[in-house]
Each structure stands twice: as C-alpha cells, then as structure tokens.
Image: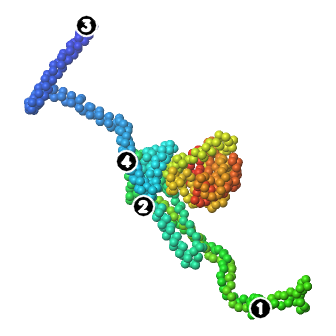
Amino acid sequence: MAANTKWNDDLAQVNNAARQAVRAAKNAKEDAKTVKRAAGKAAAGNWMGAAVDMLKSPRAILAVIAVFLVLIILPVTFVGVFLIEFPGAIINSITAAVKTAYDDLVVGWESLKIKVSNGIDDFLTWLTTGDTGDASSGFATDVAAAQDPDFASYIGTSNALVAVLNEYFRDEYNSGVKANALMSATNRQTQLMQEAADDGILPEDITCELTWTSNDSDYLDWTFSLIACDSVNRMQDTSDDTPEFSAAHLVSEAKDLVSHYTLWDVGVRETVTDGTITRSVSHEEQQWVERSEPVLDDDGNPVMELLTDEDGLPVQIDGEFVWVPVMQTVAGWETVTVTEDVTFPTRHISIEYYANPNPDAKDHILSEFGITDVADVNDLSDLAIVEEQVQQLRYLYSTAIGDLTASGTVLQWINDFYTNHSDLVFNGPTTVAGPIEDWRSHITSHQGATDIPEHSGGHGGTDISSPSGTPLVLPAKGIAVAVTNSYPNEVDYAHPRGNLVLMYYGEQDGVAGNGIFVLYQHMASVTAAPYTEYAAGETVGASGTSGMCTGPHWHIESYVGTAKMDSEYFLS
C-alpha cells in the first residue's frame, strides 16, 4: 500500500514538471513572437508600437534584459577582468617590445646620421689635404669594441648605443677641449718665461716642458656615467612606475648635456724650479803687460852677443862660440782674452695642462637619475655604485680595445710559452707596476689612439717617454719569454718594434692560463736571455729609440693570458 502511494506521488511530480515545461515552452514561444513583432515595428520606424507590444508582455522585457546581460555585460566583465588581472606580463612584454623597437629605431637613425656625417668629414679632409680622414674610425672602433662578449654581457644593452653616445661626447671633446687647454698652457708658458727673463736669467738657461696629463679617451666616462646612473636608478627604484631602460632617453640626455652644459674644465698646473749652472766664459780686457823681446838694429835684425857663463867668460860648444839675441824688457797696455768659470741662474718651468669633467654637468646627471651619496651601514651609496660601474665599464672597454689591437706575433709567443715551457709557470700577483715611477704622467700616446698616421688602425700599446738609457728594473720576479736585441739604438722604420723583451710575471692570482705578460719595445739594449728567470729589482735592459719611433720611450703592451689589456688601467 505504501509503495503504491510513493509511486503515485512520484508520478504526480513528473506530471507537474512536464506541465511546467510545456507552459515554459509556450511562454517562450509567445515571448519570441512578441519580441519579433516589436523588432519588426522598430525596424519600420514605429517605435511607439514596438514599445506598446513590449509593455504588454513584461515577461518578454525580462527575457530581453536577461539576454543582454548574458551577451553584453558578461563578456565585457570577463574582458575587463582578463585585462586587469591576468595578462600583465603579456602587456609588459608587448610594451617592452614596442620600446625595444623604438630604441632600435633611435639608435639606427643616430648611427646613420653619424656615419653620413663622418663620411662627409673624411671626404672633405681628403679634398683639402689629400690625406684619408679619420672621422669614421672612432665610431667604427666603438662599435667593434662594444661587440666584445664580456663588455656586451656586462652592459646589457644595444652595442651600437655605446658608439652613438660616445660620438656625441667625442665630438664635443674634439671640438677644441684639448686645444683650448694647450692654448692656456702656452700662454702661461710665455708669461713665466718673461718673468724669468725679467729676473735676469738668460734665454738659454730657461727650459720649459708642456705635458698633457688627461686621457684622450676620457670622454668615455660621460657615456658610462649615463649608462651606470640609469642602471643604478632602475636597480634601486622598485616602484611600478620605474621607467624601463630607454636608448632614446639616454640619447636625449647626451644631447642635453652637450647642448646646455660645459662638460670640461680645462686648466694648467705649473712647477718652477730654480738652479744654477757653471760655465767657462771668455772675455777681452786691457792689462799692463811686461814681456821680454829681442833688440833690433836699424835693418830690423836681432842684435847678437856672445853667450857668457857666470864668470862672464864666453861659452863655447864644440869649440865654437855661441851667439844669442840681446833681450830687452818691454811694458804696456794690451787687450787680453781672459777665461773664467761663472755661475749663472737657471729656471725650469714644467706645465701640465688637462681637461677634467665639469662638476655642474656631473651633478646634473646624478640629479636626473636620482643618484645620491647617501649610504647606510650595510651598503654602498648609489654614487659609489655608479663610480664602481663606470670603472668596470672603462676597464672592459679598454680590454675590448686591446683585443682589437692584439698582435698576432705576441700571441704566438705567449702560446709557445705555455706549450713548450709550461714547467716555468708559477703563481703571480694581480698586476705589476709600470716601468718607472709616476709613469702615467709620462704617457705620450694611449692605447687605441689614432692621432698619427702610424696609429691609423689604433695604437697597439701605451707609449711612456723616458730618456734613452733609463734602466728597465723589473717590478716583480719574471721570466724573459721573447727577446730581440739585434738593432742599433736609432730610428728604424724597417723594424718597427726595435729591440724588445716580453716578460712573464706569473699566473694572475694563481689562475692557470691567466699569465701576466708585459711587452717592452724600442729599447736601446736588452740584457735578458730567453726563458731565464730574473728577480724583482734586476735590470734587463734600457729604454731607447730603436725601431719605428720619434724619440726615446717605451712602447708597452700588457696581456693576461692571450687577452690584451690596456696598460694604462691594468698596471699599478
């Protein structure tokens, strides 16, 4: 009985559900007809009729609203949520791609302008002088150096950007910075020499030397300062609105600096040293002179008399009497040449002229990127980090330049040393000192320089002036790897390197394959023997003028393994 009751209840529920479904279908059909009629009237322009039909069926109005919500509101909501919450990384990626494309466009356009401008400059130089211009060489060297793997990986940006930025600062530097500094030095030289003359010092006792103490590639520091400031700014500021790296921004900053700021302070430093010199000086003067001379007869012949002894008796030699001239004393004033040692005052004038970065321009860069010198107890200041990065960039750049000018002959000597004389390898220091004290102040040509025709491809080393015969005293224990000592101490363009010695100073910090090698060229003589060990302080030769050179100096090249370094920054 109970089972029959349950069965009847279930059947009743099914019947009710079926009736509701049929009713809903009829309602939907009627609503569809109502909407269709209203839509037809609206399409015909009968908006009032359409509204009346819809108002007659509230259920149809609700259905239309429901469809609107499903078809319009929900997709918009979904898209909004998607754009806001989900694809931030995608949007950032798209934004970054756009910025990268724009940066590439800016760098490409700047590079094109530079190449065209430099090409015109080179052509005009050829037209006016007949010589090949070098305006394009600096840019080409920068591009090549920036492609060095170590430099490119550290800087983390467009290789060409470095060359573009350098071009702005190099052009500004070459526009007259060094020439203006030299003019200041020359003017001061004239003043000091006149002062010496006014002090009674003879012109031949006044000596003067002018020395350029800045580096011709110091313009690089402006490029690297911009890049380092941008890097530190983005590293320190983690807010959402921190600007991404922008080549266009850096190019704009470079233009602003060159256009609105004086980048260089030129000046001179002077040292005046007084001394004395003793010289033999001859002059004529009137003196009372007494002298003995023979008495002459009327014919101008000497009057003769017999030579007598102490007793007044005539002297005979071999039985013959001896006749001698009669002498008389004559006195009077005569012009006499007198020679005596005289001490004269001397003066040596040493003038250093330079170009240092202008502090106002540097402060502007720091301000633009929010770099401060404030540090906490556990970290460096932003400024200290910037300076550290600039030094590292300068080091990597100079190393890259070194790789461009590395000599195949020297690399062969180094490879032969490791291959055939590995038993001589020993642990060495981090670096070694230059050939003389204060050697940086005696640099006359920098590595990579293209200032003279012989350096048109980039000077392969660092030139350090030194009087001929200055001994080369080893700064540390070393082994002579290569020696040439067969040329006279004179200029010889047929043998450019002249007499030389390549010294090995051990593996840098004990790292195998990182041997420190320093090449010394243009020596007057070399006393070292190949593959012979010498102690620190021993002399292995002397500076000179052998090979292709214009005066006594050392040409120095430094290597760590087969990687060429810039001696100016590598040697201590």
Mark 4 burial class by Cα count in 10 Å: few <14, some 14-19, many 20+: few
Q: Secondary structure at mark 3?
A: helix
First along the sequence among labels 4 and 1: 4
Note whether residue 367 is visible.
no
Q: Nearer the viewer, mark 3 or mark 4?
A: 4
First along the sequence among labels 3 and 4: 3
Q: CA distance from mark 2 to mark 3?
A: 107 Å
Disc 3: which residue = 4
Circle number at residue 262:
2
Residue 28 location in percent, x, y?
A: 17, 22
Question: What's the amino acid at mark 4?
Answer: Trp
Q: Please give left or right for residue 223 compared with residue 438 in the image.
A: left
Question: What's the amino acid at mark 3?
Answer: Asn
Mark 1 burial class by Cα count in 10 Å: few <14, some 14-19, many 20+: some
The residue at the point 66 percent across, 45 percent down is 427
Q: Secondary structure at mark 2?
A: loop
Identify the image quadrant of the C terminus: bottom right
First along the sequence among labels 2 and 4: 4
Where residue 175 sits, quadrant-wise, is: bottom left
230 versus 331 height, above or below: above
Disc 1: which residue = 295
284 versus 87 height, above or below: below
Question: What's the amino acid at mark 2?
Answer: Thr
Circle number at residue 109:
4
